[in-house]
Image (spheres, rainbow, N blue to C red):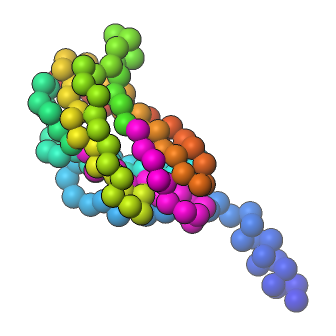
Amino acid sequence: MRRIALASLLAGALPAIACQPGLTGEGVHTLEGSVYTVSWQPTPAALHLSEFFAVTVVACAKSNAAAADQLRIDAVMPEHNHGMNYRPSTTALGDGRFRAEGLLLHMPGTWEFSFDVRGTPGNEVLRERVPMR
């Protein structure tokens, strides 16, 4: 009986195992938040200035709850206090998968991507800075 109680106590003290978004291949980025793990992959994998690109995003809840059902992606240049000249369109593909199209980084410098993820497990914004030359 003591072993079961100790095992239950330890299981509650251990951190939750991160979900596995499942994107593989060149150019995959993974962000760990408190509610979600987000993986994103641009197409083409190598980003180029002033060229449109798309992004595949997978957002899975760390609590093993329902998958994210909404995503908004954006990119800004914090040092210049402006964003992209175009607003991307995002399509939900189901099971926490999304496709965003129409992204374009128009000048060199550091861009900060933000992924505003929403769903039953909660809402969270995850960010990653990407230098562009």
Using the image, determine if residue 76 lies above or below residue 2. Answer: above
Q: Which residue does the image show at 88% across and 84% down from the upper left?
A: 2
User: Which quarter of the rendered picture does the N terminus lie within?
Assistant: bottom right
Left or right for 25, reference 125: left
Residue 101 belongs to the span the image colors magenta: no
Count of number-bearing discs = 0
The quadrant of the rendering that contains the C terminus is: top left
Residue at x 74%, y 63% (from the top left corner): 13
Which residue in the rendered view is the most extreme toward the bottom? Answer: 1
Quick one: 1 or 37, which is closer to the camera? 37
The residues colored magenta run 55-72
Measured as percent of width and height from the top left, residue 110 is found at 30, 22
* Residue furthest to the top: 80
Report x, y in % for residue 4.
81, 84
Name the one closer to the observer, 94 or 105: 94
Against 2, residue 27 (above or below) is above
Q: Is residue 91 left or right of residue 46?
A: right
Q: From the viewer's perspective, is residue 18 above or below residue 29?
A: below
x, y percentage for residue 47? 17, 36
Q: Is residue 59 shown in magenta?
A: yes
**Can residue 107 be seen from the camera position used here?**
yes
Residue found at the very far right of the displayed protein: 1
